[in-house]
Structure formats: structure tokens, C-alpha cells
Amino acid sequence: MQKTALYKALGLTLGALLISACSSTGEVSEGSGSSDPVATESQTDGTTAVDNNTVSGKDMEAEAEAAALREQTVFYFDFDQSTLKADGKPSLMAHAAYLKNNPATRVVLEGHADERGTVEYNLALGERRAMTVRRFLMANGAAANQLEVVSFGEERPAVMGSNEASYAKNRRVEVKYQR
Amino acid sequence: MVVRVFCLALLLISSVVRADLVIEITQGKQSAMPIAVVPFAWQGEGRLPEDVSAIITSDLEHSGYFRTLPAVGMISQPHTLEQVNYADWSALQQDYVVIGRIWPNGAEYMAEFQVLDVHSRIELLRHQVRGQPGQLRDMAHYISDFIFERLTGVPGVFSTKLVYVTTNRERTRFNLNYADADGAREQVIYSSKHPIISPAWSPDGQTVAYVSFENGRSEIYFQHLSSGRREKVAAFKGSNSAPAFSPDGKKLAFVRSQLGNPDVYVLDLESRNLTRLTRHYSIDTEPQWMPNGRDILFTSSRAGGPQIYKIDTVDKEVERVTFEGNYNARARITADGRKMVYVHQSNGRFHIAAQDVESGLVHILTSETELDESPSVAPNGSMVVYAASEADRSILAAVSVDGEVKFRLPSKFGDVREPAWSPIFK
């Protein structure tokens, strides 16, 4: 349980670092290894080779957790805003990691707005939201050619109804995996 | 005083009784002129398929400029000047009387009508109109336009058309509709499973541009009304939207967005040359040409929330034009260039506002409807048709540019959105 929390915390911090890094052109420097090389000579006389191959394992817990995080495919926004909310970031990082490990996989990022305001402005707003998600996914390892952005503005609400509860569900970006 | 009281009583009645009318007047002009349109005489066989004088009555009443007298309230129903007894109409406090006759002329119809001034007891005008079978409604609108222009000094728009989008509740069907300005004779001119937005008329009234998502993203199409032929006009990489014809019809302003940065572009329709007009990292959208054919109004979020700006297409000078409130978008302009109409948010509610271009004075026109959007101005600058939300449905409503006249065009089914008022057909 503690491990999970730590994993999340690490992930969040890493993600935050990457996000803050993406606006500038910060580069992460590799840690340098041992500075004093030691001269060695190779010899195999009188020795016996052993089979030291190890089996490779998967951290099933982390795998399952990443899959669970990827189950969230809809991310919500505030009115007239296109900034990502903190609660969606762990899941988006899991999507980014998956895309990084599966370079052939493509997703469409569908941006949407609630019905308030004008149709064309909302179309632009939907696109802005999808672009925010695209930038976040790219900062976390996804490649540009895996990500397609499309906005439907206020034309395809998830929920009908003129109230804040419905609006909140309609201001969204949907991550859609292409089969 | 008596007239005023009667006016008010009529208003109350019309707002309480919500009959299944196509148009429901919710507010009329205080200065509405009383006019009686006497049922026209039909001098042919059988019955006419349309009640021409009833259509004229409805047109004039819904303009807000006139208060019409129902036929049942008339003391006499003359068809010729000789039959007119002016005292009857004075007694009914009418300012004007319209009489007319319709007769067959071979396969066609002929109509002749006269407008009489009750106070001066004179014939103001006499005019004839001819129409094909099936054009009785057009003849009626023609007569309404003629009377309206002569009595108000403003061209009538009863013969104009609307295009608008209807959708079902599930948003699985989107129809582009074409109808008379009073909502009659609705026809679906394009239907799609994918969203259709932002219809816009060419200035000659022959072509409608709109945005279709049929290929999975927004692209601009032209549809030629008489042939039904469609043409893909702007499908550049990214998103293409918000088409607007220049006043001479030779250019199309629209919005192109690549990687989330919408900017206004101008496409020369003859050479197909594309020019980028705005260059800003914020949202720039909803272009609309000023009548001078040089300046373009557009919405931009460059100051944070959406506000309306004007750009000179020649020297690219940008000027902000709205300052009241934190949400002003989608400007439309009257043909004389004097009033700008747009969506304005105040106290969390979206309404239609009119702004005097010269003085900058803002007048919020609507209050009864909610989530008002997509305003489109009638070609004579008198009315604004817009989409609004009512009981979780989207309907069309209209308001005069001075805010005095209001009516609704309730839908028969589904949601009605994105109205665009045609130019006056020459």
C-alpha cells in the first residue's frame, strides 16, 4: 500500500517536473559514473562458467495500476479554461507511458465545450483543451505522430441539460484509442 | 391612451395564450400602427390553396411595426374602392386599410391590392403582382414587403429566407434547413450524422457556406441552393471554420487552426489565394466583414476572455471594440454599418446585445430567453434572429435591433440552432 502511494507521489513529481520543464528547454543531465577507470586484464584459465541468466519479471502491481489509471479516458475542464486539472494528471501519465511503450498505437484527442457561449468560440476552446492534453502526453513520452487533435466544440455534449452538473461533464477531452 | 391600453391588453393575451403558431409574438412596438387587411376577394373557381390576406396580416403583425385587426372584428369587408366606407374604419380606430382581389390569369394568379389612409380618406397606393401556381405565399410576402416599405420607409424582409440547423436530442442527426423568414415551408437541404455549424449566406443569396464534420474534423463547404451542388472549399490541415463572405462575394474570411492556434484567414474565391490575417497565440475566431468590405470584426481571447476586435485587412491595424463585461463574442453588423450585435455575458447569463458603432453605447436586447447565441441580423437591419435555450431545448427567437419587438419561433421537434438570415433577393 505504501509502495503504491510512493509510486504515485514519484509519478506526480516526475510529471510535474516534466511539465515545468516543457515550457523551457531544460535538459536532464545524466549522472556521471565512476571517474577513475581501473585497468584490468582478461583471463579465463582454471575457471568454470556458470549460467547466470536471470528471469525477467514484471511488476504486476504497477502494471495493473497503470492499466487502472488508463481506464480514465475523459478529462474535465473549468468554464472558458483549457488548463489541466491536477486530478487527471496521474491517469494522463499512464496513457503517455503506454503510448511510449507502444509506438504504433494512435489516439485521437477529442476536445469539447459546454453549450454556454458561442459555437465557434467553443470550437476553438475544445481544440485548446485537446491541445493541452496533447502537450502533456508529449511531455510524458508520447510522440506527436501518435496524437491527433479534433474539436467538436459544443456539438457533442456527453450529457444533455442546462445546469452546472451537465456543463461540468461536457467541458472535456476524450482520449480515444484507434483500433 | 385608449390605443396604449388596448395594446397592453393584446400583449398580455398573446403571452398567456401559447397557441400552436409558428411565430409567437412576445412583445410588440408601442408605436405599432393599426392596420386592417381585409380578406381578399377570389374571383376564380373553387378555393385558393393559400389564404393570401391572412399571410399578409401575419407578416405585418409579426414585424412589430403594425397592429392588425382580425377579420372577425371588421364591420365591413370591401374588395373595391367603391365598397369602402371610411367611417367603418374610423370607428375601429384603424390608420390603414388594405383591400385586394385575386383572379386566375391563364395558369397564373394575378393579385391587385390597394392601401387606404383612413384619416385622409385617400388611396395611398395600388399595385399588381403576378405569380405561378404554388407561388401564392410568395405573392403574399411580396405584398407585405411592398406595404411595409411604403408605410415605414424600411425595406420589408418577408420574402427573405432563413437557414438553420436542427438536431435530434441524441445528436446523431444534423439537418441544414431552409425556410421562409416566418418559419414556413421548411426544407432539409443537407443532412448528416455529423455536426453542421456556422451557416453563412453569400451576398447574392445563391450560396450557403457552412462547416461540416463529415470527415471527422471541421471543413468548410459551399452549397449552391438552386442546384444543390456541394463544393469543399476549405479543408486545410487542422480545423477550418466560421466562414464569412465579403460584401462583394469575392472573398471568404474563415478561421483556420493548426495545432490549437485559431487565426483568421482570407481566401480569394477566384484565385483561391490564401492570406493569413491575424497572427496571435490566443483564440481568434468568428470573422464578420464590415459593410465597407475592408474591415473585419472578430472575436479574440487576446485579453483573457473573449472580446470583439476590428482588423483593417489592408494595414492589419487591430482595434478592440467591446469593453463591457468579460464575454463578448460573435459580432454581426447591420447593413448600414451602424449597429453591431453580439453575444454578451452579464451576471453569468448570455444575452444578445446591440452596440452603437459610433457612440459605443451598449443595449442588452434580450432578457426572457436563456443561453442566447448565434445572432444573425435581418438584411433591413430591423430584427435579429438568434438561438436560445428553453426548457433544455434550443429554439429560435427574434428581437428587433431596438429591443422593442420580440418573438419566438418554437420548433416542432428537437433542437434548432445557428440561424442565418438571408440577404434580400433581387
Image: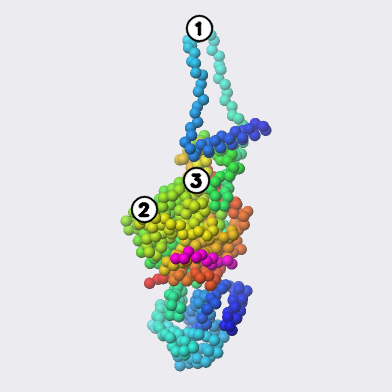
For marks 1 and 3 on the same chain, the one whose residue lies earlier in the sequence:
1
- Residue drawn at (58%, 48%) of the image: A76
Co-location on one chain, circles 1 and 2: no
Residue bounds of the magenta highlight: B358-368
Q: Which mark is residue A131?
A: 3
Magenta residues: mostly which secondary structure? loop
Relative to A42, residue B227 above or below: below
Q: Residue B302 in the image: state x and y as whole percent.
A: 48, 52
Circle 3: is it few (<14), some (14-19), or many (20+) Cα within 10 Å? Answer: many
Q: CA distance from mark 1 to mark 2?
A: 78 Å
Identified by mark 1, the residue type is: Asp
Q: Which mark is residue B275?
A: 2
Q: Is residue A65 left or right of residue B298?
A: right
Camera-nearest residue between B342 and B46: B342
Of helix, strand and loop, which one carries label 3?
A: helix
Q: Is residue B134 visible?
A: no
